[in-house]
Image (cartoon, grey):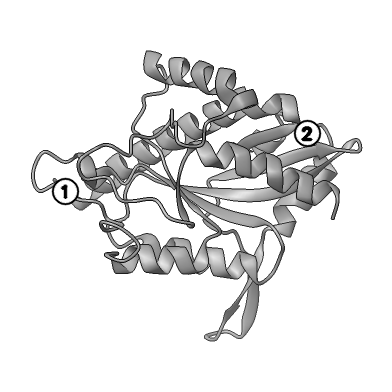
Amino acid sequence: MLDSEAQGLRASEGRRLEDVVKKILNAILNENDIYVVKGNGEDLRTIINDQNLVEQIIDYNRLPVKRPCDQKQLLDYPDSDLFILVKMNNTWRLLGIINCKTSFHSRHTMVTFWALAIRISSNIKYVLVTEDKDQYRATNPRSELGISCTESTSTRRLLESFVDRIYIIKPYQLDDENLQRDIGLFRESLPTRNQTTYYFDNPNHPQHTSYCLSVRPFDDLVIDLIRWKDDLLFH
């Protein structure tokens, strides 16, 4: 496969994962005034009517980049696939950013760079959602995160050090009946949620990495966002 074809396939797969993540979180969390949209002006305007506020949110996430060749400073936009927004007191606050990667293949360093840049310049969360897709390969399947914390890869160690959390999600298509079923089952389970029952990930897959404090099932992202919203309200 040509490099351009491979890049196109990765981009298409990345958009699929973004759409799946957005669909799950909005279906469950909109009633909690938590919304997930792509990190651009067009998508922000679908939920925010105030153009000035849209521009303010975008500007807040631009980071200064100094160019030594001409000694100019530019404002660059981070690798921000999805914005997590909270509606509160008749306005909107940015709660965090979700970076979506179906797999890494050495691209984890880009995630860690932007995670570090954002975490030292603001108090918003920067999390990663991944399918860890290499575990499903027909030939030599393996997790890019390693077997566990104690038998980890350098990818896992770097990600654990710089992003707030890593969430693993099983592969879905946007129109997948299983996706709609799992959303329904999770919603039903929320009031009395059993923390050892997972709907959006399958830890029993033979090559699945072990969970730890930093590496969690996607189900936990829903609970974390509700908790982080409460922290924001009472901050």
Mark 1 lies on residue: 2
Where residue 122 sits: x, y (%)? 71, 65
Asked if the residue under mark 1 is in contact with the one under mark 2, i.e. CB atoms within 8 Å, the reply is no
Within-10-Å neighbours for mark 2: few <14, some 14–19, many 20+: some
Q: Which residue lies furthest to the right in this view?
A: 89
What kind of element bears circle 1?
loop
What kind of element bears circle 2?
loop
Where residue 142 sits: x, y (%)? 19, 50
Give the left or right position of residue 196, taking residue 225 as reference: left
Could you say which quadrant of the image residue 197 lies in? Answer: top left
Vertical relation: 123 (above or below) 180: below
Residue drawn at the location 58% of the way across and 31% of the way down: 25
Could you say which quadrant of the image residue 71 lies in? Answer: bottom right
Q: Along the polypeptide, which appears first: circle 2 or circle 1? A: 1
Mark 2 lies on residue: 48
Q: Nearer the viewer, residue 121 or 167?
A: 167
- CA gap, disc 2 to disc 1? 41 Å
- Of badges 2 and 1, the one in the foreground is 2
Within-10-Å neighbours for mark 1: few <14, some 14–19, many 20+: few
Amino acid type assigned to the residue bearing label 1 in the image: Leu
Residue drawn at the location 51% of the way across and 67% of the way down: 162
